[in-house]
Amino acid sequence: MSNPNEQDKALTDLIISREDEVTPKVLNAMADTDDARLKELMTSLVRHVHAFIREARPTEAEFEYGLRWITRLGQLTDESHNETVLAADIFGISTLIDLINNDGMQGETMSALLGPFYRGESPECVFGESIARSDTPGVELYIKGRVLELDGSPVEGATLDIWQASPKGLYENQDPDQADYNLRGIQKTGADGRFEFHSIRPAGYPVPTFGPAGDLLKAQNRRPFRPAHVHFIVSAPERKTLITQIFTDTDEAMAADVVFGAKKQICGNLVEHTEPHPDYPNAKLPFFTCEYDFILKPGTPSFPIPPISGKAKAADQAAGDAPVEEALQDV
Ligand code: BEZ
Ligand code: FE
């Protein structure tokens, strides 16, 4: 461009002067992204977030509050607590991602969200053993079943990574009264695909409410409860890893799941026993049993990065998660 006035005009045209110029300018700035998928994700994100802002028209004070809310997600996340995962869960984001990526259409067991309490590296629990590693008052629950292929044949050498809350409604990482890795364990199936372990029947529980996720739940008058369940990651070579939960609660509690994770297809059938049973000679009466088969589909195994890696120190726990009765006073 030879004329200096024309050049100035072309440049000033590129400088933003109006609200409606921002989105195209930002999209244009990202246009040279080499990674095609990153470009697709960020383009869509910018379009939708800008559209949200144009629709809701947040004030500056609201914007500042929102940024502070997100900052606190990171500040409260450490080795024993993951507020960021919790936030994704209470918005239904984790369940939406789960359902988009796992539809159960081939006959495999339905999945469910991972949640913020998966620690990884749990101790082994051999066939028939208990995953209770410290005295855990409650009613015994015996769980057994098989890991199967789509055609019903057994999967030998499948790994089940199991974790659950106590009847107090707390995971061991939240609770100084529970031993390290209490109610967590890893078991491998034998040639017949069978697994069997026992535990203490879990309770439904409130998700942690001491941080920004809890502030939002309170502001929205939402009850912070999850229905009772046991978590599983079931994996085997050349099979898609299954992250799921078996629910052991009422339909009412499942429908009210604060993180929208409960699904009809993964409801466990609990049977109460008030008389001795020859298959469970050491069980204390009354006790519950649950039989469940997991069905895997072919695929490439992949494993989630554990949202937490350790147990909170007693002082942090006292300041943090409340047992069920205390949480109930809040709602
Ligand atoms: C859980 O099931 O462990 C869980 C899931 C989402 C939020 C909090 C807990
Ligand atoms: Fe859970």
Image (tube, grey):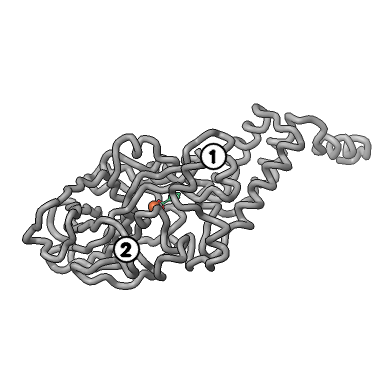
Residue 207, x across and y down, in percent: 47, 48
For residue 42, what is the image quadrant?
A: top right
Residue that mark 1 sits on = 217
Most foreground residue, 26 or 227: 227
Most foreground residue, 264 or 173: 173
Residues at circles 2 and 1 in contact by the CB criterion of under 8 Å? no
Q: Is 283 displayed left or right of 207 in the figure? A: left
Disc assigned to residue 161: 2
Q: Amino acid at mark 2?
A: Asp
Say if 129 sits above or below 13 in the image.
Answer: below
What is the residue that sits farthest to the left in this orientation?
278
Say if 135 sits above or below 64 in the image.
Answer: below
Q: Amino acid at mark 1?
A: Leu
Mark 1 element type:
helix
Q: Crowding near pointer 2: few (<14 within 10 Å), some, many (20+)?
A: many
The residue sitting at 33% across, 72% down in the picture is 123
Most foreground residue, 12 or 302: 302
Residue 53, x across and y down, in percent: 67, 33
Q: Is 181 displayed left or right of 92 in the figure? A: left
For residue 78, what is the image quadrant?
A: bottom right
Q: Crowding near pointer 1: few (<14 within 10 Å), some, many (20+)?
A: some
- Asked if residue 278 shows in the view, the reply is yes
Residue 15, x across and y down, in percent: 82, 38
Of the 4 image quadrants, the one containing the N terminus is top right
Closer to the N terminus: mark 2 or mark 1?
2
